[in-house]
Amino acid sequence: MTTRAKLAADGPVIETDIPARLDRLPWARFHTLVVVALGITWILDGLEVTLAGTVAGALKSSPTLQFSNADVGLAGSAYLAGAVLGALFFGWLTDRLGRKKLFFITLAVYLVATAATAFSWNLWSFMVFRFLTGAGIGGEYAAINSTIQELIPARVRGWTDLVINGSFWIGAALGAFGAIILLDPAWFAPDHGWRLAFLIGALLALFIFLMRMWLPESPRWLMTHGRAAEAEAIVAGIERRVRAEGHVIPDTPLARVRLVARSSTPFSEVAETLFRRQRGRTAVGFTLMAAQAFFYNAIFFTYALVLTDFYGIEANHVGWYILPFALGNVLGPILLGRFFDTLGRRPMIAFTYTMSGLLLAGTGWLFAEGLLTAQTQTVAWMVIFFFASAAASSAYLTVSETFPLELRALAIAFFYAVGTGIGGIIGPWAFGQLIESGSRWSLFGGYMFGAVLMLIAAVVMWRFGIAAERRSLEDVARPLSAVD
């Protein structure tokens, strides 16, 4: 037992080496299971977003819905609006009630809402169900990103976080492949295929429920909430499992932290931390999140419309173009992620944002000049999003590791909400309008705006970013409840 508690005037003081013990662990089966059980949420999100994008043509041709391009963009914005509000509400609950409880609450919201989407009867019902689906997914972002950060050893935290966030595109590939079959009129009627597509997500969510049953509560969260004995028992159990697999855990003196236990963190202290004490980190997080949100959501939510309206690709064939696009997005974090832990956060984040912006500007010009085909356009997107996927994932990494433990989930939710609210909700709707105009040069203007945002974010990260690689979370951001 290496956790001690004593009573202070302002509450019990916990002295513990739990963070150091979690960081010294060798990679074991436990960590692999954490990655799978939590990373599958991003697969779920990728499946959800891709289905919504690839069924755009089917929604337009549906005898029941008869959507316009603007309606498709509006539905995408409804999903993102739900994700924004869901992230804020569930992020607040995650810091108060714990990581594990929220796993199941947010997943239940998602499951029910995405199943309901399959039974939509008009634009407004579709938008309401998409809003609720987004709320569930937004809540998942806060609970899961914070847990990943708090369970994974510091030396591989960057690569692991990027790969998990990048697994979104495994779901995208599954969604694209599923859409190829479900939207084929030879298999399903035009008004049935898209409904079955949304039921896929609900079925996957049921499987995730079972996978998460064995996950422990975050020991770091428990120790700050005065539940030191529970935290100690969980860490000791993890260590026993790791040793049983044949791994050696070094028996050396470890750094200890002293914390004043608290049940919650008031909003006034959250605001004080974000907007006064750590306003520089807040500016960096906001810039990274807003830029990548506009860049990704504006382009991807309307990708199917570009293929159908400008290249004449049939709606049931869009999935074939999403598959290679998804491959580039998956490979980016896998191949580049190691460098975020070795070369460092600042240079790699600035590099990936810069490459994303420059490549989008060049591709946008080729598109406007009519020099691309559907095939070469797809190849260009593969190259762009090889870098952009790592960049977007690093934004979540940054906002989840550079703020104190007591407000980590809410900080993730805040930056996701503000960044997505500014860059993500407006983007799909605006790009839907640009595509509706039929003008390639108007759409090029939208691409250039996204490129400039990414370049600005690169400069901000290079100038003001934090070098968090291979450092414990408590070293990167001192807990609010820490005492000397």
Image (cartoon, rainbow, N blue to C red):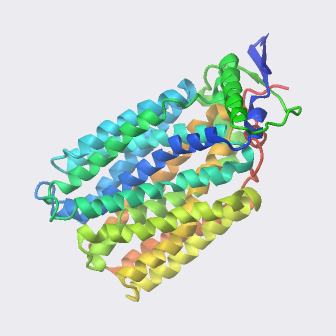
Q: How many numbered discs, if any?
A: 0
Q: Is residue 47 above or below residue 207?
A: below
Q: Quadrant of residue 16?
A: top right
Q: Is residue 282 left or right of residue 108?
A: right
Residue depicted at x 77% and y 17%: 13
| Residue 313, image quadrant | bottom left
In this view, the residue in front, 215 or 11, is 215
Q: Residue at x 72, y 60 (%)?
A: 346
Q: Between residues 483 and 232, which one lies in front from this camera angle? A: 232
Residue 215 visible to an observer of this rendering? yes
Q: From this viewpoint, is residue 434 visible?
A: no
- Spot the residue most to the left: 63
158 sits left or right of 16 in the view: left
Q: Position of residue 189 (x, y in %)?
A: 13, 59
Up the image or down, 291 lies above or below 26; here it is: below
Considering depth in this image, is 105 or 81 the residue closer to the camera? 105
